[in-house]
Every structure is written in C-alpha cells, then in structure tokens.
Amino acid sequence: MSAAQFAINFFVALFALIDPVGNVPLYAAATVGATAAGRRLTAVYIAAFAFVFLSFFYLTGLALLQFFGISLPAFRIAGGIVLLLMGLEMIRGDLTKSFAEAGSEVEPLSVRAYAAKRFELLIVPFGMPLLIGPGAISSAVIYAEEARRFGASGLAIGIGVIGAVCVLIVVAFWLTSAISRALGKIGMVIVVRVLGLILCAMAIQFMLTGLADSTTGLMRRDTAAPYQGARHSPAPDASRLPGHQGHDPFVG
C-alpha cells in the first residue's frame, strides 16, 4: 500500500465513523437557542477537541485506556449508556429544553464565552462518545500501526488526515443554521424525537457489541454485528487490536 492509498483509506474510514454530515441534525437539536456566531464557534471548539483527542490516540495508541485499565468493549458499553441517556432526553424533549435554557443564561456574554459555555455542555456525550467513540479511536490506533511503514512521513500524513476530517466537521456543522431555518420549530421537534429513538437504538447496539466483545457465547453473532453476513465480512472485534486490520463500522 502506497502513502497515497494509506491516506485515502484512513480518511474514508475515519470520515465514515465520525459521520459529520449525519450528525448535523443532532448538532442542530443540541444547539437550539444558540446564536449563529456562537454555534459556529462551538463547532470549531468541538472539531479542535476531536483533532486533539484523535491525534493523541494516533500518536500514542491506547495509552490512556491502558493507563486506567479500560478495555475498548468497556469503553463501548459506557459510551452506549451515556448515549442512551441522551436519546431518552431527546425523546422526552428535555434535551432541547435544557440547551435552550443554558443558551439564555449566557446570552449577555461575548460570542467566545457563549461558545465556551455551550462547548462544556456538548463535550459529553456529543463530542465523545457520539463523534469520537471506540470505533474512531480503534481506527486511529490501527492506521497508526500501518503508518509506521512510512516513518515520520506516515505519522504526518495521518495527522493531516485527522485534521482534514475535523475541518469537514466544522463545515458540516456550520450548515446547521440553514437546516434549522428550513425545518422550523415544529420540524425540529419532530426531527429531535425521531433522532432520539434512533440514538437509543444505537446506544443499545453499542452495549450489545461491547458485551459480545467481552464475553463468549453470550449472544448471537448477528445480534452483536448485524448485517455483516450480507457483506460477507467478519464481525469486527476492536478489543483485539494487535491482529485487527479493519475498522469498526458501528461506532463513531
């Protein structure tokens, strides 16, 4: 594999896992009541967080999780629980209400202070594990191993790929205002409730996959990794990173 192929493969994998375009409606729901300038700056903060966090794992591997003795399956289960709570709030309408109230509290502040306050509210669970989850982390670690073949230039290419994906996060989230105007208040309520249900299902799938990765024979293979048979590819197991050569398509 050439350096160009490595860059393209890493970019496609990371972009698919983070899915900035697919998360635009969720970002719109989570920033209801925010000013346009504050929403744009918040997107920059979230993208900067994603860049630093992914770059850390790309350069150091699973050092942070290993330091605390946390496995990727455990991280996936914990992330699923956090996302489940967020999804339940979206279904009940509590999420948009809480963010709107938080936005009104910081309205008199400057755009930077407003965005900082909003970023504090969104860092968990939106920044992590929704955007930066076990799949994105494992992908960064796996491709870092591939980059070793290219030496220092490989590490630089990987950092550049992470930076490019984070720039696309900013671009996608800057379109949130247009989406909010197009949907209107009632449309946003409908979107939030539907996405809340989808997010709950995603959270349950995260936990099922985590349980399957950490146990033997506890559940059916097609439950832990649905639709894999249709693609004729084995179920991913990010907990076995040293021998793993793919990426986890079920987490972001």
Image (cartoon, rainbow, N blue to C red):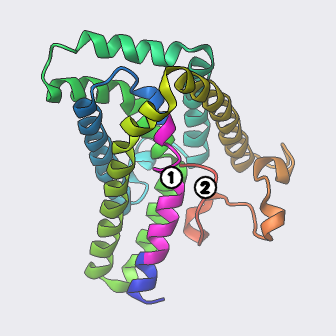
In the image, 20 versus 216, the foreground residue is 20
In the image, 188 versus 106, the foreground residue is 188
Return the x and y of residue 188 as percentages of the image width and height: 53, 26
Residue with the mark numbered 1? 19
Return the x and y of residue 223 as percentages of the image width and height: 82, 47
Q: Is residue 225 above or below residue 176?
A: below
At x 68%, y 29%, the residue is 197
Q: Is residue 111 above or below residue 89?
A: below
Secondary structure mainly formed by the magenta segment:
helix
| Marks 1 and 2, the one that precedes in the sequence | 1
Residue segment shown in magenta? 8-25
Q: Is residue 69 visible?
A: no
* Label 1: element kind: loop
Return the x and y of residue 85 as percentages of the image width and height: 58, 22
Left or right: 140 in relation to 248: left
**How far separated are the C-alphas under marks 1 and 2?**
22 Å
At x 45%, y 63%, the residue is 141
Left or right: 157 in relation to 238: left
Residue with the mark numbered 2? 239
In the image, 213 versus 1, the foreground residue is 1
At x 80%, y 49%, the residue is 216
At x 61%, y 61%, the residue is 240
**Which amino acid lies under the numbered mark 2 shown in the image of this protein?**
Ser
Q: Is disc 2 surrounded by few (<14), some (14 to 19) or many (20+) residues within 10 Å?
A: some
Find out whether the residues at labels 1 and 2 contact each other: C-beta distance under 8 Å.
Answer: no
Which residue lies most toward the bottom here?
A: 2
Q: Is residue 26 above or below residue 218?
A: above
